[in-house]
Amino acid sequence: MSKTSLNRGIRLSLTILAFCVTSTTNTITNAQEAPAIFGDVTVNHPFSPDPLTVRGMSGGSFSGSKIAGRRETLTGPCDGFVDEAPDHTLALTSKFDYLKLQVQSPQDVTMIVKGPGGTWCNDDFEGKNPGMSGEWLPGNYQIWVGSYKEGQYYPYTLKITEVK
């Protein structure tokens, strides 16, 4: 075998090895960047990345109106079924003149938020996805994402943004 053929073979092997290492590194990096599941979030104004996202599974065996302590709020009905414990806790370290929480799911889901100043419920903020936006006081907010039928669970992503 000639020296030129051997060098080409070595270069080809190194190129393939580099490609494999790069692909594996990108896969690991992308996996680490995936949103947390049932994560608790603390945000300061301003925050990055924006939007901030967390994932979860909607649903549970407790009536949304029981968790909310009412059937309806100014932001919408307290429908659906949720877990007894909140899916997420959002800690705001400062006042936000504008903040939007929006759930994205392939199914029709609901949302309940309890925090400083009260309890808010929503369904169909944008399409069949619940959400809330406006001025938010500093403090801790408990967030539940519900399903319309007891015992049905659907994946969702909760997006938190300061962008109008």
Image: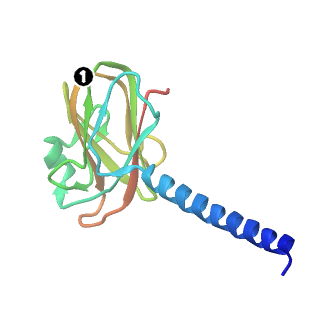
Q: Is residue 122 or residue 156 the one in the foreground?
A: 156
Name the residue: 68% across, 65% down. 14
Residue at the outermost bottom position: 1
Coloration of the structure image: rainbow
Q: Is residue 6 or residue 11 the one in the foreground?
A: 6
Task: Where is residue 41? Give x, y as percent.
Answer: 29, 38
Q: Is residue 16 or residue 39 the one in the foreground?
A: 16
Relative height, residue 138 to residue 24 (above, below): above
Q: Amino acid at mark 1?
A: Pro
Q: Residues within 10 Å of mark 1 (few under 14, many from 20)?
A: some
Relative height, residue 43 to residue 108 (above, below): above
Task: Where is residue 66? Give x, y as percent.
Answer: 14, 48
Task: Where is residue 128? Give x, y as percent.
Answer: 44, 50
Name the residue: 48% across, 58% down. 28
Relative height, residue 9 to residue 39 (above, below): below
Count of numbered circles on the image:
1
Name the residue: 28% across, 20% down. 94
Q: Which residue is mark 1?
A: 138
Name the residue: 41% across, 43% down. 53
Which corner quadrant holds the N terminus? bottom right
- 154 left or right of 21? left
- 37 left or right of 82? right
Q: Is residue 142 or residue 81 the one in the foreground?
A: 142
Give the SS element for disc 1. Answer: loop
The quarter holding residue 24 reads: bottom right
- 37 left or right of 140? right
